[in-house]
Image (cartoon, helix red, strand yellow):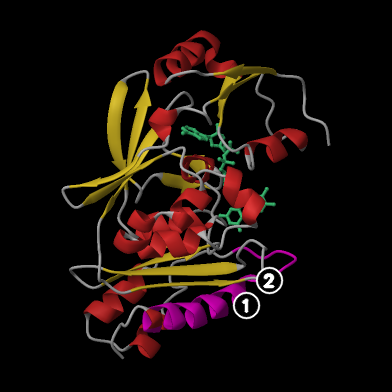
Amino acid sequence: MIPAGFDYLQASSLEHAASLMAEHGDDAKWLAGGHSLIPLMKFRLAAPEVLIDISRLPELRTLEESDGVLRLGAGLRYRDLELSSLVREQVPLLAAAAATVGDRQVRARGTIGGAVMHGDPAADVPAVLLALDATLVLRGRSGQREVSADGFFLDFWETAAEPDDILLEIRVPVLPGRGWGFRKFRQRSQDWAIVGVAVQETAGGHAVGLVNMGPVPLRARAVEEALAGGAGVAVAAVRAADGAGPPSDLRADAAYRSHLAQVLTAEALNQAGARG
Ligand SMILES: Cc1cc2nc3c(=O)[nH]c(=O)nc-3n(C[C@H](O)[C@H](O)[C@H](O)COP(=O)(O)OP(=O)(O)OC[C@H]3O[C@@H](n4cnc5c(N)ncnc54)[C@H](O)[C@@H]3O)c2cc1C
């Protein structure tokens, strides 16, 4: 498992990163924690000729709250989120989910931005960001733009980002004191989720995100609508797999994943204090 040859360039600032990307264009890829990209390159599923390392840019490591919004630099690592008192107090769902990713080494290198841009439906943070109604701040050739996390994930490993887009920041509404729940089923403690469920209480009800229940991270809209219509947790949770397309693989078939989604949704809703 040796990747094809590539050049490694280290960006010293956001402007430098942009100029390197402009110079190398289609041949280049951003490198953050490398925990998804490097394995892909080793399997020869990706073969960029140039890697532009953005992992040391302080501009991507910002973490601040203003006007009811938590602004998370795309280069923050899971460990930053797990340990940040700001994140733990203001958006505890995100801190709790980050603390379950892989092992400590993975959490020390993997970034929230890499997880979003890789677009893996089995990753935990993208489904959490859906439940949190997050906004992504991207910068590309056509300038800077904000896009909702909902609608950003198009298909397996495919997002609405342009190839040269850099994700600068993720914005999450601050929801202190509101209920939340996170449940993840896996065979061993540091495995990826076979299925995961994230629940966030909002002003209007509960938002539910699903991990590994389709080709993209999903919102469990049928559950949310059932709760909003007055159903209790047990009745609403039965709808968890409605409209999802869970994969079948060596770890679980689609029917078992659907069952897990129902069970974990009920648990996460109860953890979040949903009625029923
Ligand atoms: C052993 C192991 C166990 C793991 N377990 C889990 C788990 O339990 N749950 C889980 O969710 N994940 C898990 N992961 C994945 C891990 O979370 C990855 O680190 C993460 O998905 C990608 O983040 P990264 O910083 O490593 O991104 P990289 O691998 O550096 O990049 C991934 C992709 O995103 C692009 N990219 C990165 N940053 C930006 C940016 N700012 N703007 C634009 N594009 C960008 C890159 O070009 C690349 O295409 C595991 C990984 C390993 C190796």
Q: Mark 2 and mark 1 in contact? Answer it, CB < 8 Å.
A: yes
Quarter location, residue 52 = top right
Q: Quadrant of the N terminus?
A: top right
Residue farthest left in this picture: 67
Secondary structure beneath label 2: loop
Mark 1 vs ligand 1: CB below 8 Å: no
Residue farthest top in this picture: 23
Q: Quadrant of the C terminus?
A: bottom left
Residue farthest right in this picture: 1
Residue 110: give x, y in percent of width and height.
57, 45
Residue 157: give x, y in percent of width and height.
55, 44
Q: Residue at x 39, y 29 (%)?
A: 59
Q: Where are the magenta residues, as a range? A: 247-270
Q: Is residue 198 part of the magenta span, yes or no?
A: no
Q: Residue at x 66, y 50 (%)?
A: 105
Quarter location, residue 24 = top right
Q: Residue at x 30, y 55 (%)?
A: 133
- For badge 2, the amino acid type reads Ala
Query: From this viewpoint, is residue 138 visible?
Result: yes
The residue singled out by tag 2 in the image is 252
Secondary structure beneath label 1: helix
The residue singled out by tag 1 in the image is 256
Q: CA distance from mark 2 to mark 1?
A: 6 Å
